[in-house]
Image (cartoon, helix red, strand yellow):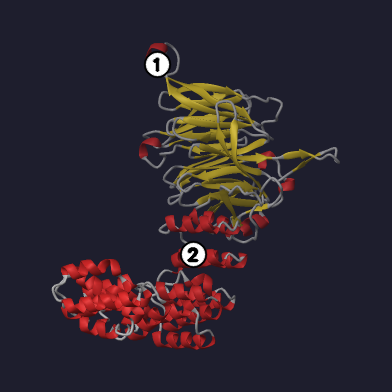
Amino acid sequence: VAEDDSGNRSQGCSTFSNQEEDSEEEPKLKYERLSNGVTEILQKDAASCMTVHDKFLALGTHFGKVFLLDIQGNVTQKFEISSVKINQISLDESGEHVGICSEDGKVQVFGLYTREGFHENFDCPIKVVAVHPQFTRSNYKQFVTGGNKLLLYERNWLNRWKTSVLHEGEGSITNIQWRANLIAWSNNVGVKIYDIGTKQRITNVLRDNVSLRPDMYPCSLCWKDNATLIVGWGKSIKICVVKERNPTEMRDLPSRYVEIVSAFETEFFISGLAPLADQLVTLYFVKENSEHMDEEFRARPRLDIIQTLPESCEEISSDALTVRNFQDNECRDYRLEHSEGESLFYIISPKDIVVAKERDQDDHIDWLLEKKKYEEALMAAEISFKNIKRHDVQKIGMAYINHLVEKGDYDSAARKCQKVLGKNMDLWENEVYRFKTIGQLKAISQYLPRGDLRLRPAIYEMILHEFLKTDYEGFATLIREWPGELYNNMAIVQAVSDHLKRDPTNRTLLTTLAELYTYDQRYDKALEIYLKLRHKDVYQLIHKHNLFASIEDKIVLLMDFDKEKAVDMLLDNEDKISTDRVVEELADRPELLHVYLHKLFKRDHHKGQKYHERQIGLYAEYDRPNLLPFLRDSTHCPLEKVHFLFFKRVYKL
């Protein structure tokens, strides 16, 4: 139904297919063709006018019929008014009374539920009729008609209709719009506004281009509010504001006046106007000159949203509408009606009625997805999740993940799983198997749930086995990061052991195996590996898990690894490993025994006194500078032993 400037179709819905415009700018409106009963009516007849109420539509035809329709286009009532064209239908605000006029001079104003009211035949065509907006209220039984004169009809207390001529003498009246106490109408000369309350005519806005035939290029009138009238005629738009005159300036002047706050020219001929918040919806009739043709040809009508400025306008959006038989239509064949309550805009042409409506958040998300702007679509859905009806946040997220996978951005796709999949275990496992299929288990491994939500142990084991095949470092990282209860620890221990048979000295695998043993509380095996590797965590492991009983036969290994740390640990835990036991283990390594006994003596001269005699030889062998201080401080060394060792050393020298 809608196309942009390049001829590409803009989004629509209902009974036909279309595609988004290629532009990166998002459309403001979406379109659908009014179908159902309307389709059948327009196959046999042609639309001449239509009026919109919040609850229903009233459609007039060239064959003199008026149809009441629901908003889906289904016929709810039908009136046989005339045998010729219905020129105008007017509804009061309640939607209970209707005014109808036709080309053969018939005028009817009646209650839709009573059929009581005014019925009259005139001897000239009546082009327009407008009932008082509050007609249903007993005090406002008024309506106006426009032919060669503007006539006001009022019902008096005797239930008779009184007629007053409000204006005449300037040609045929082609449009009337009644808002509150103000009646605006157009004739061949220009636009007038009449105040029904004060019974004063308060303005005369002249027509700009008098060369255009008013019957071929009729005036479009639209009230934006109770004081703002929008006038479109030819290619000219004026925005007129009704204001109160200062009482000191009145004299013989009307109490109100009109100020034109904006006036500008448009590119095309205006067929209809409607307000949209602080902007303006304009329906254009388009005629173009082809370079290869002498005659003009009719193009698709355009529906634009514009921002009005004092002397110009800014185009917000523009759509070319592919209405049926647009090639045969004139400017006067189009009308634009709107429903203020829902921002619905009806483009009426003889053989087609198209509804334009503002795009909602679902439409916005549709456009973002069409443009592959998945991140923005997901964000929009999350922000407006209470208002969207057709979209689901998780489904959009899944589409985003699929898009990232198709692009080959596996890490981003895996990272997005955390946010999108949430606590849905089935979705998580499906994604893991998909990543396995495409050989990207590593990408998703770091994002798997490992807190309150946990997948089946087989999932984690599958990923660990994958890392074991190709990436020992990555495998070790997962073992450190994943809680051991995520998987079958013994199964992974066996897998690592199998790999160590092929590569027995691999430090990464050995360290990881020690960590697995630690989690499994097989501390002796873990300690053995740490000592073999001279790993810095060996002391932390001993302290954390109180493994002193396990290290009694490994004291030499600990000393070889780090003498200072080992001695400090042994001395700090004498209650767990006795001095006698340490001395026994270090008997064959006197250099290590000396370090231990030296530190023991430094801490307490009286501890290990039975080894002081042995220490004399150790000091003499490994630490002569500290021998004399030791002898001076120790009270447990026999003097003759000292002399013997001393002369023995001298003799050897």
Mark 2 or mark 1, earlier in chain: 1
Q: Nearer the viewer, residue 520 or 76?
A: 520
Horizontal side, residue 92 vs residue 305: left or right:
left
Instruction: Report the Cα–Cα distance between label 2 and label 1.
Output: 65 Å
Q: Position of residue 578 (x, y in %)?
A: 20, 82
Q: Nearer the viewer, residue 170 or 451?
A: 451
Q: Count numbered badges in the picture.
A: 2
Which three-letter amino acid code belongs to the residue tagged 2?
Lys
In the rendered image, which residue does mark 1 sit on?
Answer: 246
Horizontal side, residue 187 vs residue 196: left or right:
right
In the rendered image, which residue does mark 2 sit on?
Answer: 416
| Residue drawn at 56 percent across, 73 percent down | 440
In the rendered image, the vertical position of residue 192 relative to residue 35, given as above or below: above
**Do we see residue 589 in this rendering?**
yes
Q: Secondary structure at mark 2?
A: helix
Q: Position of residue 352 (x, y in %)?
A: 64, 52
* Crowd class of label 2 (few under 14; some 14 to 19; many from 20; radius 10 Å): some
| Residue drawn at 54 percent across, 32 percent down | 230
Q: Nearer the viewer, residue 387 or 118?
A: 387
| Residue drawn at 54 percent across, 87 percent down | 502
Q: Nearer the viewer, residue 411 or 601?
A: 601
Which three-letter amino acid code belongs to the residue tagged 1?
Asn
**Do we see residue 542 in this rendering?**
no
Q: Position of residue 577 (x, y in %)?
A: 22, 81
Q: Which quadrant of the figure has residue 15? A: bottom right
Q: Secondary structure at mark 1?
A: loop
* Crowd class of label 1 (few under 14; some 14 to 19; many from 20; radius 10 Å): few
In the rendered image, the vertical position of residue 522 relative to residue 326, given as above or below: below
